[in-house]
């Protein structure tokens, strides 16, 4: 299965196999030079005390869902290999993803 922007997936923790797998949201598009082989993603969390997270509600899902209310972590960006992906939870609307990417870009620009 090729994953797309908006897919919510489960993957192992990058760089630390001792940590449990977790959900990520794929934010890369087909413009990624290795689309289908690598994906740019942001972390999801259930923690509510981070000020700049972006909620992903049941209404945001086009298909599937998550068992708990979750939040996109815009600064938690990773590059995942297709082989790192363990499961697919669903697909969300573009709006929360666009918010996360806009916020990430804001962290990177002067």
Image (tube, rainbow, N blue to C red):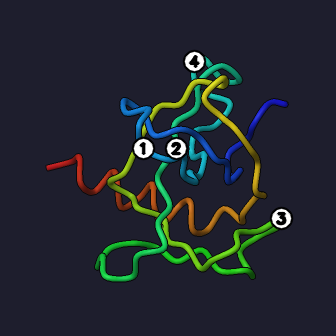
In the image, residue 26 sits, relative to residue 2, either above or below, namely: below
Circle 1/circle 3 CB separation < 8 Å: no
Q: CA distance from mark 4 to mark 1?
A: 29 Å
Residue 42 shown left or right of residue 104 in the figure? right
Q: CA distance from mark 1 to mark 3?
A: 25 Å
Q: CA distance from mark 2 to mark 4?
A: 15 Å
Mark 2 vs mark 4: in front: 2
Mark 1 vs mark 3: in front: 1
Q: Residue at x 50, y 61 (%)?
A: 44
Q: Secondary structure at mark 1?
A: loop
Q: Secondary structure at mark 3?
A: strand
Residue 76 shown left or right of residue 106 in the figure? right
Mark 3 vs mark 2: in front: 3
Earlier in the chain: of badge 3 and badge 2, it is 2
Question: Where residue 41 sits in the image (x, y, percent)?
Answer: 52, 43
Q: CA distance from mark 4 to mark 3?
A: 28 Å
Circle 2/circle 1 CB separation < 8 Å: no
Earlier in the chain: of badge 1 and badge 3, it is 1
In the rendering, which numbered label is found on residue 64?
3
Instruction: Give the residue number, with chain letter if any, for mark 2.
Output: 41
Circle 4/circle 3 CB separation < 8 Å: no
Mark 4 vs mark 1: in front: 1
Q: Secondary structure at mark 4?
A: loop
Mark 2 vs mark 1: in front: 1
In the rendering, which numbered label is found on residue 33?
4
Instruction: Give the residue number, with chain letter if any, for mark 1.
Output: 19
């Amino acid at each position: 299965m090729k994953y797309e922007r908006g897919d919510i997936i489960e993957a192992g923790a990058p760089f630390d196999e001792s940590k449990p797998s977790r959900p990520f949201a794929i934010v890369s598009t087909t413009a990624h030079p290795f689309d289908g082989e690598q994906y740019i993603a942001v972390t999801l969390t259930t923690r509510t005390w981070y000020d700049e997270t972006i909620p992903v509600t049941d209404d945001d899902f086009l298909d599937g869902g998550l068992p708990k209310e979750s939040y996109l972590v815009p600064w938690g960006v990773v590059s995942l290999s297709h082989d790192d992906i363990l499961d697919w939870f669903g697909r969300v609307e573009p709006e929360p993803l666009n918010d996360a990417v806009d916020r990430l870009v804001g962290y990177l620009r002067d």
